Image (cartoon, rainbow, N blue to C red):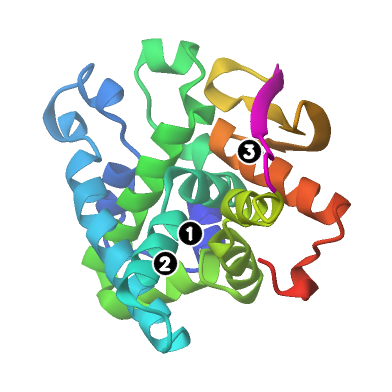
Amino acid sequence: MRELEEALGYRFKNEALLREALRHSSYANEHRGDEAVSNERLEFLGDSVLGFVTAEFLFREHPDAPEGELTRIRARLVCEGSLYEIAKRIGLGRYLCLGHGEEAGGGRERPSILADATEAVIAAVYLDGGIEPASALIHRVLLNEVTEERMVERRRDYKTALQEFVQRSPNQALRYQLTGESGPDHDKTFTISVLLNGAFAGEGSGRSKKEAEQMAARDALERMGQSEESGLV
């Protein structure tokens, strides 16, 4: 547990809160007493703490962005994929308490379980130390400089940019086609090609089909000479 606290950059005064944050409902259902309390309530609280801290960060860092754009950026920043990446980076899966069935089914690597546990850990830090250490943790693991660059990347809608670009010429048709899948069911990678008038225009991969489509559209724009520096996206 000390190793996890070091990864979090926070030492708990009440370690019971951290243990609860790591306790999946499948484990709680198989035990009684204090161990019967799952991390679901902490997950609920952590979602709100994460949303608030992220909203404040975006409000201050992007003073010219309208409400709708801020909402979209926040949703992308605190999505399951981002929280899953955080959990993987700090090795959270090693510390989870899972039921036998969930353990056998690969629960320690399941994105939804890891994402929920990340929110629960954030709530545990908040309850143990208040908003300042919780905010510091969120900034350290999510809102750092590297992630800020990735956030700006996520703001770009390459599919819309590609659609608008090709529509400058009449009778242009875009189509996205799934060309590959790899990895286990709980952690798949999808590969998608984008076709312009039936001809290959670009290809991209991602953990979801939507992400793969965005990367395919980005690839197509670059192949067409529409780099990000051009101001198209």
Depicted 225 relative to depicted 201: above or below: below
Residue 70 shown in magenta: no
Amino acid tagged 1? Glu
Asked whether 135 or 176 is in front, the reply is: 176
Please provide percent x and percent y for residue 142: 51, 64
Give the residue number, with chain letter if any, for mark 3. Answer: 213
Residue 5's tag is: 1
Asked if the residues shown at circle 3 and circle 2 are in contact, with their CB atoms under 8 angstroms apart, the answer is no
Q: Earlier in the sequence, mark 1 or mark 3?
A: 1
Amino acid tagged 2? Arg
Q: Nearer the viewer, mark 3 or mark 2?
A: 3
Residue 139's tag is: none
Q: How many marks?
A: 3
Q: Residues within 10 Å of mark 2 (few under 14, many from 20)?
A: some
In the picture, measured across the screen, residue 201 lies left or right of residue 149, that is right
Mark 3 residue element: helix
Q: Earlier in the sequence, mark 2 or mark 1?
A: 1
Q: Residues within 10 Å of mark 3 (few under 14, many from 20)?
A: many
The answer to whether residue 213 is visible is: yes
What secondary structure is the magenta-colored segment mainly?
A: strand
Asked whether 173 or 230 is in front, the reply is: 173
Which quadrant of the figure has residue 58? bottom left
In the picture, measured across the screen, residue 45 lies left or right of residue 4, that is left
- Measured in 3D between alpha carbons, the distance from the residue under mark 1 to the one under mark 3, in whole angstroms, is 38 Å
Part of the protein shown in magenta: 170-181
Asked if the residues shown at circle 2 and circle 1 are in contact, with their CB atoms under 8 angstroms apart, the answer is yes
Residue displayed at 27% across by 76% down: 131
Residue displayed at 47% across by 38% down: 95
Residue 11's tag is: 2
Amino acid tagged 3? Glu
In the picture, measured across the screen, residue 25 lies left or right of residue 143, that is left
